[in-house]
Amino acid sequence: MAEIAVKLAIDQLLPLLKKEVKLLKGVHKEFTDIKDELESIQAFLKDADRRAAAADGDNNSEGVKTWVKQVTEAAFRIEDIIDNYMMYVGQQPRNPGCAALINNFITSKQRHQIASGIQDIKSSVSRIKERSERYGFQRSLNQGSRDYRGSRNNQWHDPRVAALNIVEADVVGFEVPKQRLINWMVKGKEPTVISIVGMGGQGKTTLAKIVFDNKDIIGHFDCHVFITVSQSYTVEGLLRNMLVKLYKENDEVPPPRIFEKYQESMLTDEVKNYLQNKRYVVVFDDVWNEHFWDDVEFALIDNKNGSKILITTRNANVLVSCSKSSFIVKKHELQPLTPKQSRELFNKKAFKINNDSKKLNDIAYEIVEQCNGLPLAIVAIGGLLSTREKNVSEWEQFRDNLSLALRNDTHLIGIKKILGLSYDDLPYYLKACLLYFGLYPKVYEIKSKRVIRQWIAEGFVKEEKGKTLEEVAEGYLIELIHRSLVQVSSVKIDGKVKGCRVHDQIRDMIREKFEDFNFCKPISEDGQSSSVGIIRHLSISTTSVYLMDRIESSYVRSLHVFQDEDEYVCHEPTIPEKFKLLKVLDFESAPMLNVPKNLGDLIHLKYLSFRSSNHVSKSIGMFQNLETLDVGDTTTRELPKEISKLRKLRHLIGYRLSLIQLKDGIGKMTSLQTLCSVDLGKGGAEVIKELGKLKQIRDLVLVNVHTEDVSILSSAIDEMKRIEKLSVSSFDIHTFIDLNLISPPTKLRKLQLHGKLQKLPKSILELQNLVVLKLSKSKLTEDLMESLQSLQHSLLILSIGDDAYQGSHLHFQNGWFQKLKELYVALGLGHGDINTVIDKGALPSLQKLHLEKNIPTGIQHLKKLEVLYISRMEAEFVQHISTTEDWNWIMEHVPNVEIHTKDGEVIGNSDLTKHKNSFQHFLLYFSSYPYLSFFFSLFCVILFFHVFFNK
């Protein structure tokens, strides 16, 4: 009977299957066509936003912008169709059996949806192509557009033109960099390229012109040339411009031959001949091309006369080609103005006479704060307000609508244009990466790992041979930093970027791009909370995450939820069903009671981060495409065994995760690069064997290691050839964690060992690329500095943590640890003082020193020390500050000093200085009055004898 039932079922399914096969063939063909169409559109979109900007001021500008927006949305829809196709159609079995036939029947709805979607988008693309002829773009889908600065109808005032005629008295905050640059220019006989690097509007041109016009510069050089380069230039035009200005400087008439159709080599010779035996200075302002130096190098003769080249640029990569020449390269990075400097500059522009209105001044300072130290914005806004009545209500209205004014006011439009140039100059693959920073709240430090992993999940990062996607994405971030579009907020000890952010004005420019291309919809309590049309990303900065239900778009690819720390509200949200194409779901900055129950529907998900949740559902196993899972701050300890199905997972981040239930599957997750932290308390040996199979692992954190685990752990680490960061901890006071590595991983850069060691493992001392070593609870008794000698040429951070060392002294000898930047020395609670000695010539690069209970002998030799932190200091110590020679040096040379006494008192630089000054003032007061000093001394003697005889 069963066989008959199966045969009847198959007979019923066969007609449907034939229909499905026919439909599938049609889908395959249509899919190939639509992929080709996407490539054509993407080639055009590489320059689409520049085309929209180029239309500013034209009569049909709004039509062009709308049309470009439609092209962008068409590309979004094609990408979605491709993703659905690959998920529902492209992964079907080639030789379907009975189960596969049923599966094909189940997915017929999706097939019909895909086929219908393809037909719909093809119709839309046809209409778009028809409209493209109206704007003259049909023939240039694969070509770049003109630079919008050259548009005849694009009327805006370039602030850099005014910068060339600025009066130095009107400039604020450039005194120190000006003198620094002048010193570089006039000193030394070596030919030198000096660069001023900064974001648009930071005052590079202004500073360069001030230096160029300085009397010391004019008197020092025989020839002076100031050339504005910009994005569009020809080498011939550049050289010809130089020659004309050189002749004009000496009131000479340029020879007619230089205006003829010269070849580049002939113009090069003309410039070289003119500069022969002359000490010259040439300013190349506003350089964009990274290969610019290759165009001009051969014309700039090295005549050993101390000639100088000054380059201003937004892109630090411009200097790379300069460094390959015979010219020395020096770089000055412009910093934002301080709040005080910002207010001074604003007052110069906004108030022609002194302003006595406190209320108006308060409003002015609030306006200045929104400029974040950007001179361009301060000058433009100050100049605009100088033309308005000094009326409190009018200024308050301007302050409240500043963002809108920056976008629409004709006097301020130059700010947007200047910053937009940097965006337009980006290669296509970096534009989406920059726009992504706008998803994060204002004044928000973005961890580099977080944004890099999200870029990868979104598909922004393209594969490069010999590199991981993370390494490629890190290169993207560095390029954005070098182009002065992203600011570094914190760095790791090895110089890599830890945290970053964008300037407020850059962020405003990004947010405007959101509206132009529907890249993102920011949602907040006081902002618009609903929208129509295609929205690619959602950024929610509110406690009411349910506002996302009002978003009608089904094209959302990422959802980011942020919440202020002082608004702790736990959520148990439901992800709207229409968000089925989500690739990134980031709840890291918003606590939840539970993970959304319907996450299993998000089969495209690649990045999932949530904090403060109490469990991870078994449905996690359905995310076959998941690459990052971050449950770092949750109470989750045991992960469901379904996690082992995630073969594409690259980063698994939690806190003391138990993997015993995954012991038969974790070794098959061969894409894992990050795994932290894992608790080996149960079945540690079995888990460790599986970990040894993870050949791609880079970052591994293991806790609760036991004696029986150490040997097998050593063997597993031997197999991890790519590992860069390793942390091993034991909480058992009887366990020794001496790793005996036969083949130490050569790429290991950071190592942390928490637990007893018989002695420092020999294999550890062979790690010549180790930059960070942290030891705690090691209970070592051997001379630690002698043991670490072999690592002293690579170490940047050394932490001798709580109860790591039980010896009585630490001696840093002359020449030891030349690169070490941070040193931490802590003691166990029952440990006595350690006599620390620093010889002259030791630790010459040390910047941070953290100690307990003592001051090292020879601390005055640490000339680069910036931070000194001392804990558990005796309270009586403070009384002797004024008489201690070392502390006299510390207070004069160390910017940041903090002392924590055993009594809980915290003393900083100001307290130390105040205490010392009070004591000195006391002595000075008595020394000024001899009779008073005599009677005070006599009183002290009488008091002494009184106490002595009473005893």
Image (spheres, rainbow, N blue to C red):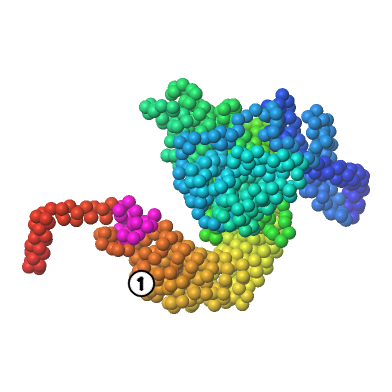
Quadrant in which residue 577 is drawn: top right
Instruction: Look at the numbered disc 1 and give the secondary structure of its residue.
Output: strand
Asked if residue 897 lies in the magenta stretch, the reply is: yes
In x, y percent, where is residue 748? Answer: 59, 67
In x, y percent, where is residue 506? Answer: 58, 39
Residue sitting nearer the eye, 871 or 796 = 796
Q: On the image, numbered disc 1 is attached to which residue?
A: 835
Asked if residue 402 lies in the magenta stretch, the reply is: no
On screen, 279 above or below 398?
below
Question: Which amino acid, mark 1?
Answer: Asn
Label 1 CA crowd tier, 10 Å (few <14, some 14–19, many 20+): some
Q: Quadrant of the C terminus?
A: bottom left
Identified at 48% across, 46% down, the residue is 216
In x, y percent, where is residue 617? Answer: 63, 52
Can residue 302 be seen by looking at this rendering? yes
Identified at 68% across, 44% down, the residue is 239
Instruction: Judge left or right: residue 759 versus residue 913.
Output: right
On screen, 58 above or below 450?
above
Give the residues in magenta: 887-913
Residue sitting nearer the eye, 250 or 696 = 250
Residue sitting nearer the eye, 17 or 800 = 800
Instruction: Judge left or right: residue 592 versus residue 76.
Output: left
Quadrant in which residue 803 is drawn: bottom left
